[in-house]
Every structure is written in C-alpha cells, then in structure tokens.
Image (tube, helix red, strand yellow):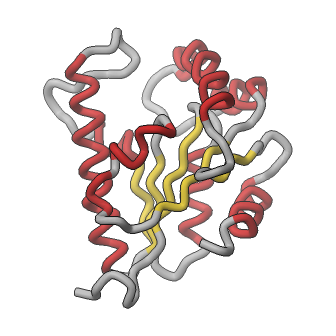
Amino acid sequence: MATLGDVAGPIWLITGVPGSGKTTIARAICARYSMAVHIPVDDLRELVVSGFASPLDPWTSEATRQFALARRTAAHMAADYSDAGFTVVIDDVIWRERAEQHFPDLGGRPLRKVVLLPALEVALARNRTRANKSFDTSVLEPVIRDLQNRFAQNYGPEDWTVLDTSDLNVEETCSELFRRLAHS
C-alpha cells in the first residue's frame, strides 16, 4: 500500500441542495482523472435493506444514525482509494460546520470542499427533470426551498469553494472548479 503523500489521490467533497448537480459534477470531475471513484453518500445509505430511515419521512434519531454510518463508510472508502492513488469525489448534502466532524476518518487528508449553489429557480427546475431517483422528486421541493437559504448563508469562501452554477453547463462548472482549486 502506498503511504500518504507518495501517490495519494485528492479527495473532493461536493455538496449543495438537491438538484444542484452534485452527482453530475462528481462524475464529470472523476472523468478528468485516469483513476477516480465517485462515492455518493445517498447510495451508501440506500444499501440498507431492512430498517431504512428515509429522510423524506419525519426526521428521527435513526435517520441521524444512518447518515453518520454512511458518512463514516464514505470516509473510510475515500481514504483507502486515495491511498491507492485514486481521486475520490464524495457527494453529500452536508452542513459546512460538520464536514470535518462527519468525515473524521480521512486521517488528516485535505478535502477539496465545494458547494454548488445555483439560484433557487434553477435548482427547482433541475430537480423536476431528474431521472436518477426512484421516487417523485417533487417531494424535494420544500426541502430545496428550505436548504437554499441555509446554504447561501452558511458557506463562505474561507474554506469552501462556493460556485453559482446557474448559468454554467457541466464542462464550464468543472473547468471553473479546477481553475479555482489549482493550488490545492
């Protein structure tokens, strides 16, 4: 196994409201590397076969516990793949102040932290056209409306790259992220 610093790949954390393009951009970032893995936290949570606590139902302590388990699993996976030389892109809806807390098992590996923050109308429109969910995405509209303001107020440029993707396509978004994160 490679040691950290030899061939360790970068680790990205992409967040934003539902419909902001996290999965699409995570996959596009991965495509720019010769070895990359995409880790969607929602997919890890949905591996639960019995006892799944849906975040679309009233929130419970079990939902909190299952999110924490999925995030710890994502962190372990990210560290293992990074150590093997892969670029890793985690996508998750996560609060700024809790990112390091939720991904403690990265062992000090730096995160390239990105917030995709299109205008509310754009996020709602994108959500309506999503085909990657097994449920009617219209149920996410109140969540998007609530989260949009919270994300806009809680993320700053001091430790996150915040990008309004309202007028950017996938290629333009990736190019801008790579430009902004060239130093990390």
Where residue 146 sits, quadrant-wise, is top right
> Which residue is farthest right?
167
Residue 182 percent coordinates (x, y): 68, 74
Compared across the picture, whether 69 is left or right of 24 comes to left
Q: Residue at x 44, y 77 (%)?
A: 9
Q: Give the quarter of the image for residue 98.
A: top left
The location of residue 179, given as percent across then percent down, is: 75, 69
**Is 137 rendered above or below residue 94?**
above
Residue located at (74% from left, 25% from top):
120
Q: Residue at x 70, y 30 (%)?
A: 123
**Most distant residue in the top direction:** 58
Q: Quadrant of the C terminus?
A: bottom right
The reply, left or right, for residue 122 in relation to residue 76 is right
Residue in front for this viewpoint, 107 or 158: 158
Is residue 116 left or right of 8 when viewed as pictured?
A: right
How many circles with numbers are drawn on the protein? 0
Q: Is residue 93 visible?
A: no
User: Can residue 154 be spotted in the picture?
Assistant: yes
From the top left corner, tell me how far across and down residue 97 is, in percent.
46, 38
The quarter of the rendered structure image containing the N terminus is bottom left
* Residue at 48%, 72% in the rendered image: 10
| Residue 166 location, quadrant | top right
Q: Residue furthest left?
A: 50
Question: Could you say which is closer to the camera, residue 161 or residue 124?
Answer: 161
Position in image of residue 8 (x %, y %): 39, 80
